Image (cartoon, grey):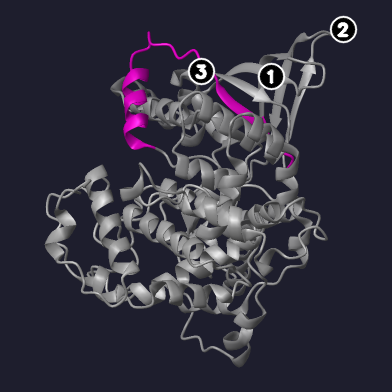
Amino acid sequence: MIFKYQAIRTKQTETGSYLILFSAPATQINEWAGVPQKTIWGDGNETVGFQRSENPKRRDDLVSFFSDDNNIIQNPLLCATRDFGASVAFTPTSSEESKVQHGTLTIEMESEERDLLTALKELRAQLESRVPELREAQIPPELMLKLKQESDEFSEVESTEEDEHQGDSLPEFTDESHIFDFWRQVAARVKVLEELNDYEASVFQGFSLDSVESFLKPLVLVDGQHRLSGAIQATEAKLGEDELIQESVNRISAGEDPDDIYADQANRVARHLPVSLLMTDDPAEHVFQFVVVNQKAQAIDKALLGTIVSTSLSNEELKGVSERLINSGIQLDDYQAATYVVRNPESPFRDLVDRGFGNSGDLLKWGVLLALVNSFRHLSGAKLYHQSKRGHDFAAVWRQNWLSESAIVDGFEELGFDSAYGYWSSRNGPWRDCFMRFWSRVRDLAANTTSPDARNYWGKPSHSNLFNKVSLNILLADFFCYMFTKDKTISSVEAIDGLVDGWLGGTKPQDYFGRDWDLANTKKDSPGTRKQWSDLWHSYRTVPNQKLPKYTEFRKPYNEQ
């Protein structure tokens, strides 16, 4: 299948990539431009796409706008080329070198329709071309087993001893696990479908043909998915008008192919949308352009932005664009650190934080988790709410007095760091395992992890007395208060358990957080409530074995005196 368009090619700088400016019917754009969305497929596994999920209201508003032919959209769709399975080329009409050239853009792609297995194989090959190490990666047998057991196409499947012990040999979780995880999900479905041999459906275990093909089209739609889908729906509405329906009936009666009639009519009535095509195949550049456009123009949700910049590229791909992202105001390092904590299977926050995918339910806000991570990592901002006017930043004063004395940062110079703090706070530094170990121990001692209705449930921030912004920040600040006032150092990750046990010694955190505080009409994050809860907990914790505060105290206003 070949598409040709009159176009203009231009460069903004000598070293920049070419931009191709042209116009095309929305229905044709939909043929060759994919929208690789950042979403969840299958059993909680995310894609390596970077587009937001479609917002139906925004799309419907554009359908209404496009229904009036006099309404004009001036800003173009932003696209970029892909170096995979198709040809996109610009042929200038003149050989004269110039910053602006007229010519023809040709997009050539396979016209043969794929089945789901073929599409998944192509997606697997694309991922392996981006990260060559994937070619040697193994598919966990237990994943294959799970897919078969959950598929109606297979009769009863029994596990083997190899399946049961495979978990012991799974690779260690890393910053780059997102792309390996996605590859495993794709590759496992390829293997299972190959065994089925004659699978004809377009959906299998959470992966649909349409979604997979969005990663395989010759161009990627970097910005403008709602404009495109709105224009397509407006076209479908026009094709349903009586005049065009009658034309179709007459042409079919004359022997024309219905598919050819549809394509002809669609191209005639579809809105021609302006397109700005960036001639670069680099996935990092695609993500960079998306992030900059959506951060600088229509701001993207912080949770999804953090997820996208951390889990759409391999580490190697991210290297070339990281400095540019940072210079554009993107908190890349912070996002990567928080995303690691959210995705790590060993983390107590795994699957409990809103990452911007939509319909996420009662989850901890991304900004709350990011603040907790930054406080622990950078050892700053850990203040008890009720001491805000006269109190210390206990993480900061502990850092000044005891971090360099802690054995956990010994040898930082040999590791190439200028200071103990530089080593501690580096993205892969000791803070990370200590952070997860600290909250795991807090969860084990204070939380209920089995009953969502429990008031100390580890989850459901709107319901839990423990797992919410206010309580988590109070606990973190109070822990560093204990560490500072008791002259405690951190010798190892394993030592965190003992430090938490000592901090909570003499308290009954299960009873403290597990009672019904009768918080009807009480806003947890109001200044008065934050200070009251902070004062109640700190007073209770610092006087060993005292009685629990009365539940009525938690909704009283804080008394500054």
Tell me residue 417's x, y (percent): 77, 53
Q: CA distance from mark 1 to mark 2?
A: 17 Å
**Element at label 2:** loop
Q: Considering only order in the chain, which callout, 1 or 3, is on the residue closer to the N terminus?
A: 1
Task: Name the residue at 54% across, 72% down.
Answer: 496
Residue 95 included in the magenta stretch of the image: no
Is 264 located above or below residue 145 in the figure?
A: above
Residue type at mark 1 is Ile
| Residue at the image position 72 percent from the left and 27 percent from the top | 279
Q: Is residue 468 above or below residue 281?
A: below
Label 3 near label 2: C-beta < 8 Å?
Answer: no
Span of residues in magenta: 55-84
Residue at far bottom of view? 161
Residue with the mark numbered 2: 96
In which quadrant of the rendered view does residue 7 lie? top right
Image coordinates for residue 455, horizontal then vertical, percent: 23, 68
Estimate how packed mark 3 is, as few (under 14), some (14 to 19) or many (20 or more) residues with alpha carbons within 10 Å: some
